[in-house]
Image (spheres, helix red, strand yellow):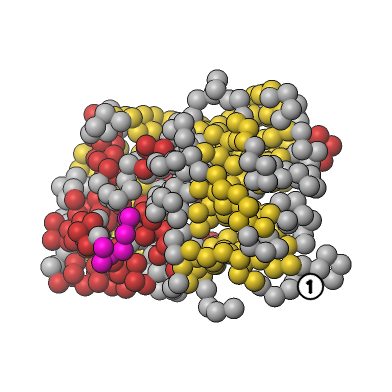
Amino acid sequence: MPLYASSALTFSRTGNRLGMIVANAEGFHLYLQDIDTETHAPGAPREVYSSKRIVRGPVLSSNGEIVVIGSSDRSGSLELSLLALDAATGRQIGELWDGAQTGMATFMFSPLARDFRLLATSNRSGVHRPFLWNPLTGERTNLQLDELEGEILPVDWSADGQRLLLVQFSQAVQRLYLYDVEAHKLTRLEHPSGTIAYYGGAFFGPEGEIFTVWQDATHPSQLIALDGETGRQVRTVLAAGEVPQSHPWFSIAFPSSDGQLIQGWLSLPEGEGPFPTILHTHGGPTAVTTEVFSPANQLWVDHGFALLTINYRGSTTFGRDFEKKIWGDLGHWEIEDMVAARNWLVEQGIAQPDCIFLTGWSYGGYLTLLGLGKGPDLWAGGMAGIAIADWTMSYEDSADTLRGYQLALFGGTPEEKPDLYRDASPITYVEQVNAPVLIIQGRNDTRTPARPIHAYEARMKALGKPIEVQWFDSGHLSFSDVEQAINHYESMLSFAYKVLHPTG
């Protein structure tokens, strides 16, 4: 095959067919490979679909007869319709679309042979809700979940095809449910509070149990077994190692500049405030912060900092309008939400006004740099990891998969939307930066490339602005090396101390 950037890979349940989506300069492509189930030898990859715009999925039926993908050809954005293709010929056999301003996502086909019901979600109600669709007959069945708030996402389908495992997101708090497909009966599971690894980390296990990877702010990730009827924890399958006593997280909410409530997770050190404070923003932006065990966040609180991590506009699971607010307007509403978070922290007596630091990784690193430039007098400093400093350079240098995502997020290329790319880029606001900046960046990163950071550093130094850039040799997932991660956070803590006590 020609050189490509890999986007997604999946097998049919029987293992006889593999599907993968790849991207290159010509766009996104769906390839299928037939696999001999006795020798496991794969056949030659064959392209069955391509598009200039971003494609998501694929999902294969149990025996690989049908493949469904999410297509952005209708919307031109990150909102997808569903296309069903004959996996043998590539012929389109069905399409499902809920109209303009709506999006869909695939999950999985029924586990039963010759049962072509696909479990998917649509946000036509304003929040993602699951439904069943048979692309051969066109029949669609919406799950009866009107009594639940927030977004509901699929987690697993029982091997007998009778039950679905669903997860509810309500203000970034998760809850698992069972759904009887035939009886349309919903059962709430009484599992421990915290975060369930719903994407591939929770599933129907043997002997009627439900297995899930679980964690909360004070307990590291571990595999637990739940009672298959009640959801109560019955045992720990794989325990986590011992960790120091950790600080709990509290869910809070505050109004942004337009009145929209923004949810966040607050953790406080011992003693009375106000404290020096870390305002953290997650990566993505299509992501959400739930209650997780974060050694990095615990580090700050252990050393006397308050920490608030927020689900800014653009975050997922808060509804369609909340997520889409930033599309075509990157960096505006996120910064509004960050400034509102700062104001709330000061008003509550939690943060010392002159000792509030910004930090984040990937898109959170981008928001850190942008916040320092657009609100220069609000922050004591910023610590940006694997960040984006110039969207045009990033578009030119990133992998083709990310280029397609960026194109959908901005609604056009840098040539088509030059003002938007310029206004959204931290490098545009370098002259306004007052606070010291630390950037930790990978030299071989294809998601947040190195060249924009070199340019940002050069501009900062030419203007006499305080900046320190630390380079490491790997790519975007720098924390796969534990020692490297420890070094990163030691540098960040030392940087914060140096800002707070410049003569100490």
Residue at the image point whose x is 79% and y is 44% from the top:
112
Image quadrant holding the N terminus, namely bottom right
Does 417 sit above or below residue 249?
below
The location of residue 167, given as percent across then percent down, is 59, 34
Query: Circle 1 sits in a helix, a strand or a loop, which is it?
Result: loop
The location of residue 485, given as percent across then percent down, is 48, 61
Which picture quadrant has residue 244? top right
The location of residue 389, given as percent across then percent down, is 28, 63
State which region is magenta.
410-416
Q: Which residue is mark 1?
A: 41
| Residue 271 in sight in this render | no
Residue at the image point whose x is 18% and y is 69% from the top:
459
- Secondary structure mainly formed by the magenta segment: loop
Which picture quadrant has residue 208? top right
In this rendering, would 250 be left or right of 39? left
**Which residue lies most toward the bottom here?**
2
| Residue 70 in sight in this render | yes
| 267 in the magenta segment | no
Question: Looking at the image, how many numbered discs can be counted on the residues?
Answer: 1
Most foreground residue, 134 or 366: 134
The location of residue 501, given as percent across then percent down, is 24, 52
**Which residue lies most toward the right here?**
38
Most foreground residue, 474 or 177: 177
Most foreground residue, 404 or 214: 404
Which amino acid is tagged 1? Answer: Ala
Residue at the image point whose x is 46% and y is 31% from the top:
125
